[in-house]
């Protein structure tokens, strides 16, 4: 059985930044309105999706040409609102849809984030997931913490951050701490509430946690790092690994590498799920699907890809000959994004990668429900537990998936009929309520 996770952000266009130019892309105006989001969440739940995944950023990036001007002009993930305030409303209008949100370990203090996430997990009846990121943009760090933190150190900090949060969520309050004993005048038993006294090189958190145990205690831990350090971090801490690949071959190599890394920390592949990103263009006929794909590509301006590539990788690609081989360019930012291109059989130039990255380096599946389902079966045989669905047009892409692809997947036994609303997100995705292995460093 596959899981389907819808990808978005609180900006005008989650996948193709130039989609605001299309008349049938409703998120361009809708992202600022609550009814757009509640309507989208309800559509996804009815349509067979398991979760809604929010990406997030923390700055108006200035890497391309050393200025925010191209970022603003091209609308590269700006303007963008914060997804956290949305989650309670989305929880109230859905029954089973998981809500996965991005939060940076570089910017949120663990104690503060632990309280916010416990609150959301409570209000959603255990449907929260946390996409753990470390951030990469120099202006992000300048705005929030002042000093830029190098790539590997960010992951060292992230490991301590996750460990401190898990101590708060899992160790501070016993299951039976809350008594509500009116006769004895005891709301909660102080002997069942503990300091966690986490001390690390970067993080010190005494506790106790402010929140009583929530349905999941710890949100489902997602991670999308594809660099060497990112993959090592993911197999130690995450339950759901979200990845980008241009081809099935790239995903197969990734799945094998993750399994080898997981074995070094005594984790079997059954203890985590792999969710490669896909961008589907699915329609009743091949001609219709190709026409939709062509129309989306016609929206894209090459500079948009250069701006996005520069900002995401924290590296100014304006300084290179556009026909220079991409593998000759070193970066400090989101290294896994670059490795997606380098792992491909094709020799990518800066220009080619920028144009492709304008719609993200994912497998684009263009065709009928039958042909797209065939391809998804091949990815499943290679280890995919489900897919993060990238939508060029919102809600158009998600509606096409729900209308055309979901029935085909159900007919093949690859997707369940809509289950009841019971169960936490961890139970639905992982098949268990058991928390993942814990590494405190």
Image (spheres, rainbow, N blue to C red):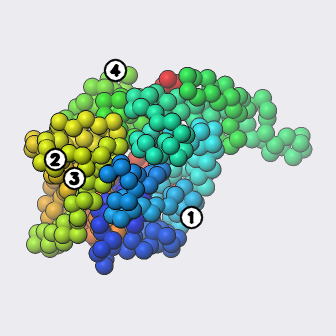
Q: Is residue 356 left or right of residue 152?
A: left
**10 Å crowding of disc 4: few (<14), some (14-19), many (20+):** few
- Residue 122 location, x and y as percent? 61, 51
Residue at (28%, 50%) from the top-left corner?
A: 309
Quick one: label 1, few (<14), some, or many (20+) residues within 10 Å? some
Number of labels in the image equals: 4
Judging by the rendered image, the residue that carries numbered circle 2 is: 321
- Say which label, 4 or 1, has the lower sequence index: 1
- Could you tell me if residue 312 is visible in this image? yes
Q: Earlier in the sequence, mark 3 or mark 1?
A: 1
Label 3, label 1: how many angstroms apart (C-alpha)? 36 Å
Q: Residues within 10 Å of mark 3 (few under 14, many from 20)?
A: many
Q: Which mark is residue 354?
A: 3
Q: Which residue is mark 4?
A: 264
Where residue 292 appears, x then y in whole percent? 19, 71
Query: Could you say where residue 320 lies in the image, as x and y percent from the top left?
Result: 20, 45
Position of 136 with respect to 143 (left or right) is left
């Amino acid at each position: 059985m596959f899981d389907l996770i819808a990808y978005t952000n609180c900006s005008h266009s989650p996948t193709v930044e130039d989609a605001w130019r299309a008349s049938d892309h409703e998120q361009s105006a809708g992202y600022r309105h609550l009814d757009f989001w509640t309507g989208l969440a309800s559509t996804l739940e009815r349509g067979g999706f398991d979760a809604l995944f929010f990406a997030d950023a923390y700055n108006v990036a200035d890497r391309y040409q050393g200025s925010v001007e191209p970022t603003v002009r091209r609308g590269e993930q700006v303007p963008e609102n914060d997804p956290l305030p949305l989650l309670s409303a989305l929880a109230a209008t859905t029954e089973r849809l998981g809500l996965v949100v991005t939060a940076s370990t570089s910017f949120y203090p663990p104690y503060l984030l632990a309280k916010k996430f416990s609150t959301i997990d409570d209000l959603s009846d255990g449907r929260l997931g946390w996409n753990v990121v470390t951030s990469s943009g120099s202006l992000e760090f300048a705005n929030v913490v002042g000093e830029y933190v190098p790539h590997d150190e960010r992951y060292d900090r992230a490991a301590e951050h996750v460990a401190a949060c898990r101590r708060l969520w899992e160790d501070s309050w016993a299951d039976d701490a809350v008594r509500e004993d009116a006769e004895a005048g005891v709301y909660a038993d102080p002997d069942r509430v503990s300091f966690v006294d986490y001390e690390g090189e970067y993080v010190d958190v005494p506790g106790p946690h402010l929140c009583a145990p929530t349905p999941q205690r710890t949100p489902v831990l997602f991670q999308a790092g594809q660099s060497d350090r990112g993959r090592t971090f993911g197999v130690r801490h995450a339950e759901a690994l979200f990845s980008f690949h241009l081809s099935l071959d790239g995903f197969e190599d990734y799945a094998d590498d993750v399994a080898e890394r997981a074995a070094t920390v005594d984790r079997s592949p059954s203890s985590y799920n792999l969710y490669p990103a896909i961008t589907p263009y699915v329609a009743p006929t091949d001609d219709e699907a190709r026409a939709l794909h062509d129309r989306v590509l016609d929206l894209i301006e090459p500079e948009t890809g250069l701006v996005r590539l520069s900002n995401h990788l924290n590296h100014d690609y304006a300084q290179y000959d556009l026909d220079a081989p991409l593998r000759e360019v070193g970066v400090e930012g989101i290294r896994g994004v670059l490795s997606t291109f380098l792992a491909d059989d094709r020799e990518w130039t800066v220009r080619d990668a920028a144009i492709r990255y304008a719609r993200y380096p994912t497998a684009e599946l263009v065709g009928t429900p039958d042909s797209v389902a065939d391809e998804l079966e091949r990815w499943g045989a290679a280890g995919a537990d489900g897919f993060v669905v990238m939508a060029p047009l919102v809600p158009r892409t998600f509606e096409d998936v729900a209308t055309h692809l979901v029935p085909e997947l159900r007919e093949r036994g690859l997707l369940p009929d809509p289950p009841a609303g019971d169960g936490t997100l961890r139970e639905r995705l992982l098949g268990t309520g058991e928390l993942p292995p814990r590494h405190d460093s």
